[in-house]
Image: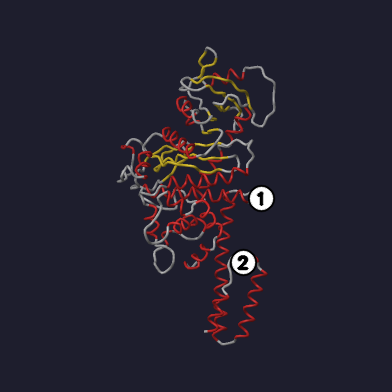
Amino acid sequence: MDTNLQICTIKNITWLTAWVKQFCPGKTLRQAGIKKRSGVTVDWLLQLLLVLPFIDLRVYQLHGSDNELPHRSTFYDFLAQTSYNWRTLVMMATLRLIEELEPLTCRSQDRVIIVDDSPYKRDRSKKVEYLGRHFDHSSHTYYRGYRMLTIAWSDGHSLVPVDFELLSNGDAHKRLGDQPNVDLRTHLGKRCLAAISKATDQTLNMLDRALKAGITADYLVFDSWFAHAGLLHKLSRHLPVVCMLKNSGKISFRHGKRIYQLKGLYEKVQSRKRQKKSNEHQIIGSILVDMLSGPRVRIVFMCDRRNPERWLALASTDISISPERICQIYAKRWAIEVFFKQAKQQLGLAREFQLRNYAGLIAHTSIVLLRYMMLEYYRRQCTDERTIPGLFYTYVRELQMLGIQVCIQLILIEVLELIARQGQGQLLEQAIDLIGTFYQSHPWLHAFSFEKERVTLNSES
């Protein structure tokens, strides 16, 4: 498609401009330090970056200066700025979105903050800053890239990403990429220090920042990879924790006067005489124990649906809630897995830009989070049940249709200008009236207005 048509299409995306004005206005961008002295405005650059996955356009295609779109170097320079505070921008957009979503969900629903990490793979890269070698526990293979540590807020219906860190290896000998040459006093410098620190420390920092910013939740939820006594004790000071437990010999529990491993507690619960209850979670039983060097927790044992021979264990530092509610709270953790998959498949995470600088990776990942927030916001506005991928492809088709509307208008204008040049004024007026009637009878064309004034001026001249 012609680039000029794409420009006209982008400028007529009402849902994009409305979302940016509401959640990322110019005042918010300035508060995050995202501003320019000259050239293309930052809000226009941000809109273009947000809409790239929805249109058939890539940054590497922007190589000329004969159109209104910025040159591709403008985008790369924008993403590579070390003074921009992308964390502030994402946090402020998150707070506004949560404020919009809160009235849509009843107060009895538990709000949770979810913590998880996902592989950020750059397997074909060699010279990317802070590139590290990590182990993927799902595929049991090593990969090049980062660990994307993310916390998100969820009310059980929507998930809103709150903050993230792209973690590299703490050991310099295990890092493949160079260290960024950046002032550690800048926002990027602080994120570089966080990238080589422990994931547990960054989890505490991100949770503390989210709560201080005003994000409220009832529980903190995460998988078994964080379920250690010391960390549970620290996290439970902020929020009650619901997590999965790993059947490891390194974690011990005290029940009465005896010390048990998790498997021993399961055998103790299973041997209890209990009435048979049918429930959808297939709960085996629960028990109150004290973690050695950790908090007092309620452990709920349940059958694994994928393999009835196996069992799973959930722990809650809030010992007052029932086992059924513990299972319901932990089930909300799955939303972040869906977020990771959709961000990589539809929204271009880790594959849209081939950036080598760490600042660009941080900026692009922040933009991916903003894209997801935008889709999540409009998904909750729909009267029918929509998924994020379904809404994404709906917007893609809408933008394609906008391009068709632009082409239709250009053809009509050329025909009318030809009639005007021939001096047939009466035929011109009849044609304009006929086209106006055509537009009124086709509501899908109303989004793109007909430029009658332009034809009239050409006729009079």
Note whether 13 is above or below 204 in the view shown: below
What is the three-letter code of the residue carrying label 2? His
Q: Label 1 belongs to which residue?
A: 384
- Point 54% across, 23% down: residue: 297
Find the residue positioned furthest to the top.
257
Q: In this view, does 85 lie to the left or right of 403?
A: left
Specify the color scheme.
secondary structure
Q: Which of 109 and 333 is in front in this view?
A: 109
Give percent across and percent down for residue 298: 57, 23
Question: 294 or 168: nearer the eye?
Answer: 294
Identify residue for label 2: 446
Residue 448: % across, % down: 58, 67
What amino acid is found at the position of numbered circle 1 in the picture? Asp
What residue sits 55% from the left and 13% below the top? 256
Q: Quadrant of residue 35?
A: bottom left
State if disc 2 and disc 1 touch (CB < 8 Å).
no
